[in-house]
Image: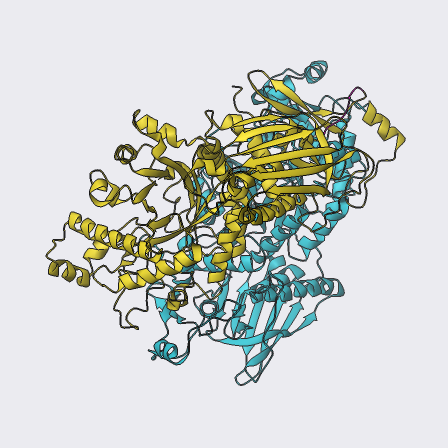
Chain colours: A cyan, B yellow
Amino acid sequence: MWSLQVFTVFAFAYVASGQFELPNPWTWRCVPQEGKDSVCVKELVTATTSGTSSNAACKITCGKYGPLWPKPKSAKIGNEVQYFLPSAVSENIVASEADKALVVQAVEIFKDNLNAYHPGYKKRQVVWRSRDGAKFIELRVSIEIEGPSQSHLTLDVSDEQYSLFVETLPSSSITNATIRAKTFFGARHGLETLSQLIDYEEAENSLMIVNSADIADQPSFTYRGLLLDTSRNYISVDSIKRTLDAMAANKLNTFHWHITDSHSFPMVLKSLPKMAYYGSYSDRDLYQPEDIRNLVVYGRVRGVRVLPEFDAPAHVGSGWEWGPQEGLGELTVCYKQEPWQEYCVEPPCGQLNIANENIYPVLGKIYKEMVELFGPIDMFHFGGDEVNLNCWNSSEEIVNYMSSNRVDRSADSFYGQWSIFQNRAYDLLTEANNNLPVPGILWTSHLTEKGRTTRFLDKNKYIIQIWSTGTDPLIKELLENKFRVIFSNYDAWYLDCGLGAWVGDGHNWCSPYKEWQAVYDNSPNKIALNLSSTVDLSLILGGEAALWSEQVDSESVDVRLWPRGSALGERLWSDPDHDWRDAEYRMVNHRQRLVKRGVQADRLQPEWCHQNEGLCYINKA
Amino acid sequence: MWSLQVFTVFAFAYVASGQFELPNPWTWRCVPQEGKDSVCVKELVTATTSGTSSNAACKITCGKYGPLWPKPKSAKIGNEVQYFLPSAVSENIVASEADKALVVQAVEIFKDNLNAYHPGYKKRQVVWRSRDGAKFIELRVSIEIEGPSQSHLTLDVSDEQYSLFVETLPSSSITNATIRAKTFFGARHGLETLSQLIDYEEAENSLMIVNSADIADQPSFTYRGLLLDTSRNYISVDSIKRTLDAMAANKLNTFHWHITDSHSFPMVLKSLPKMAYYGSYSDRDLYQPEDIRNLVVYGRVRGVRVLPEFDAPAHVGSGWEWGPQEGLGELTVCYKQEPWQEYCVEPPCGQLNIANENIYPVLGKIYKEMVELFGPIDMFHFGGDEVNLNCWNSSEEIVNYMSSNRVDRSADSFYGQWSIFQNRAYDLLTEANNNLPVPGILWTSHLTEKGRTTRFLDKNKYIIQIWSTGTDPLIKELLENKFRVIFSNYDAWYLDCGLGAWVGDGHNWCSPYKEWQAVYDNSPNKIALNLSSTVDLSLILGGEAALWSEQVDSESVDVRLWPRGSALGERLWSDPDHDWRDAEYRMVNHRQRLVKRGVQADRLQPEWCHQNEGLCYINKA
């Protein structure tokens, strides 16, 4: 045995860094599986072993989609690798000046991602081997954007399509990678895909890339979102940046920022400074205007739209205390009212005081400043969930208002008032957006219940975000009424479920925990078709996983989001026709990639399973 | 209104750091509650407000136990604070030279913990205000160890008792804190308690301490453990250090290190280098001898015993491959044998080959080196769980061995062989420990089932760690047979439960998630008394929460362990006669303290609840 011989010849010892002096006793080999994708098999190196391969080298060349996540629409990936050093990467960009400025930044991110593959990256101890001999190639990346310059995502899937062609000519020392796209957004996806065809090779202390690849790709859904709530707990700007980094790695394109709620108001508005002064948890728990603008740009160069939500007329409270001081009267009602159970679903309650006309100019100012901070916007999220009629009905001011308007206090009358509010909010937003109307998104609510939606809401103005379960007949009704929808059914895509309750004991309301397999298998199209075989699937814009932040903050946000957000990413980008089982090995490998990039993604399996693909099964399929 | 006046006089603006120029509009007041502990109530500062207080200042002076976690046996805590700067802390140590050396390190940790309260600590931007005027006091800490020098914990609770007396004489500019203990371990608990009577005061950019305190304290249980598995996934040395930091903050005293298993063998042994060479996941996923020695010392100065486990005869596999190479034959059987379900509870199986006499000298070497690395030891964990008889029974070598020894292949015969193995292992450990026998710990297993325990195991040699449920009648039997026990019943104290399955779909085997409330309410004494009113509770040494690492690694270990490990800490230190409800506000506050110290503890509730104690309830009790 070879390694026995090694033991006999050399004294066994370790170098100071904690690494073995001997070569890895293990090698990995790509082995086809009957009726399934190939797997990397770990084997002992013996005298008869012809050539060895690291686990990483096996994984980037093995299987139909190699190490790509989400898997592309079509892919041919070579089965050999070329070694190169980050210093040998050059790029050529063919694009309009405006797009070029974005691509330059995307290339920097790409190069940083390559550096992150080095095991010393986190400790800032990246030392690559020096180049020696003909073994190392140059990587020439060409990026061509063919369409007219487009600085923002629209709801068109062709925005994001790209092709990637990698080739290494025989006996050449150059690998060419060519990315073609219609927009910057497609081009950056191409760079992301390219970065995934590259990994660190331990034995060479260099990078490696597959010698060839031919990929054509575009998303299945145009809206691929992740919601983060920064009101129940504040999430640091750094944590949001990490979230955007990870979204980019998963080709998710919409960061839905649920920035305010009853609990806190961390958004600093210059025109309404008292909102954050009274409403933030502290003067450290703030998003300054420049933070927001920076994050919008940070997202854009990563292919992510930062979509603002201003939730109203419920889910307000903290930050609205100053109305009486300013002579505007009470702007909210039932905030902190007790017992809270009678007025909302969780403390501290609070809804806008619809009897107080002063709420509208304030709302107009909020929208105006949000449009400036987040814009240009192509959508706006109005929230609009969980209005509690008893809250309004318990306010003497509102009761009098209803009475003076000769409206009774039936549920339907309250819904009517709510829809009046919503229409005014929509108009205020349009006005804030220089009279340019954009689609508004609303959560499913009492307003969207059977029979009400078409009465209260205009399908041309509103997109409905579904947060009920995947068997709710409402989904069918919305689609039949031609509403565009986004799926966030809580039984699969609420990432905060499964922990202990935060009021009382037992587990939180939407338990159990939504495991990555459930996230992956949640198919909006299948859900819709199960409810009706005749619905127009083109109305399904996509989906979004939500992380409500009652039980998460900057410390745990990564663990909660990733890699479950990756499962979402592949569902929405690739919309696979198989279940999670066929994605498992790529998923486990992709999680490792996220960690290398500084994302504290949760661990799904023992490393043993990652080194022994196919052996951590429950039933042989 | 005062804050309205402020608005009128000053222009509203923010300083560059993102902080408001205006003072906090909110103040907190300690308000007694009928039949319950006092709470801090958030109130708007108005013209009639007499004196303001930060939330932190309210919390360290409010309630019977102030901000202390775990709560001490008895406490009187003053309701005023004194301000001071870290530079004004001095210490006086009265102890033997050996103890003094430890106390000096504990004082350094104490001072670092004080610095960690500064909000700039994580970004290494700690700038305290400069001292001005008479407002700031000196903090003089006196530490007196009365007993003879004791460098290691024993199973005696008096090891850890301490008293802490804080006083500030009227019109004095000195606060004296006096800690008295019998051992170093008690003294460091006193320092931990003292550090919790201190917090950061935002308005002063200084520290503050309660003006007076009188605390007498000792643990309810002598064994207060946390298990970390570093075989299923490798956990970095830094992450283990953070775990020990957090244990110290919760007065947990035993870090049970499940260092090896079938999956990987990360422990580098000089006498058996091939074990980690073949058995580690990579040459980065190693514990070098110096790492282990350093961690043992790191734990000791934090009051934590690092308890080694070497799990056998099952739960072995990776790292044992080299037997045939060295002419020792196969040291294990059924490792990676398929289908794994027939040979173990999870891939990749593996048990020691009890037919191969060569396993004993190897085991002897392992024990010898572990005693050197972890020693001096006062206990040793032999593992001893989940032996699968079919694994042994499927090995031709073992079947022949049984036959040649004229033993049949009944379950009882296999148990007999297992107990022979265990007795030899115990003797090898004793030999490795210079012939000094120490208690061995064993998991509950087939060997401890009804009727077998007394036949196979000696109660004077073995302590049994219970990992079945809290209603298992076995608990009664063990106690009636006078075995000392440690509780780790999985229905409350397995911290890996509630995630998705890692083989197959659905949720992992011990789901649901064990929320902090369930961890807190799991009382070993109550469990035992529920099973028998006549058991001798002194046999219950304590308890331990376990974090098996199939689905956790360095990225998520903090989130999984904390603050649930804190709930365990109070159960085992204080053994409260009430449930989690009476601990909730202290728990939420203590979690914030852990985060300040760099531990990524999970968030249990919105910050809103932390700022509005008593309002996040489900039912008014």
Q: Is residue A331 left or right of residue B533?
A: right
- Residue A375 percent coordinates (x, y): 74, 47
Q: Quadrant of the C terminus of chain A?
A: bottom left
- Residue A527 percent coordinates (x, y): 46, 43
**Is A583 drawn above or below residue B69 in the view shown?**
below
- Residue A188 percent coordinates (x, y): 63, 62
**Is A148 drawn above or below residue A521 in the view shown?**
below
- Residue A308 percent coordinates (x, y): 68, 43
In the depicted view, which residue is nearer to us: A127 or A214?
A: A127
Of all residues, the one furthest to the left in this rendering is B406
The image quarter in which residue B462 lies: top left
**Is B285 drawn above or below residue B172 in the view shown?**
below
Q: Is residue B596 left or right of residue B6?
A: left
In the depicted view, which residue is nearer to us: A15 or A443?
A: A15
Q: Which residues are magenta?
A: B48-53
Tally the numbered discs.
Answer: 0
Q: Quadrant of the N terminus of chain A?
A: bottom left
The image quarter in which residue A22 lies: bottom left
Give the residue at x 34% y 62%: B365
- Judge whether residue A233 can be spotted in this image: no
The secondary structure that most of the magenta stretch takes on is loop
As for residue B237 lying within the magenta part, the answer is no
In the depicted view, which residue is nearer to us: A483 or B379?
A: B379
Give the residue at x 51% y 26%: B581
- Judge whether residue A431 can be spotted in this image: yes
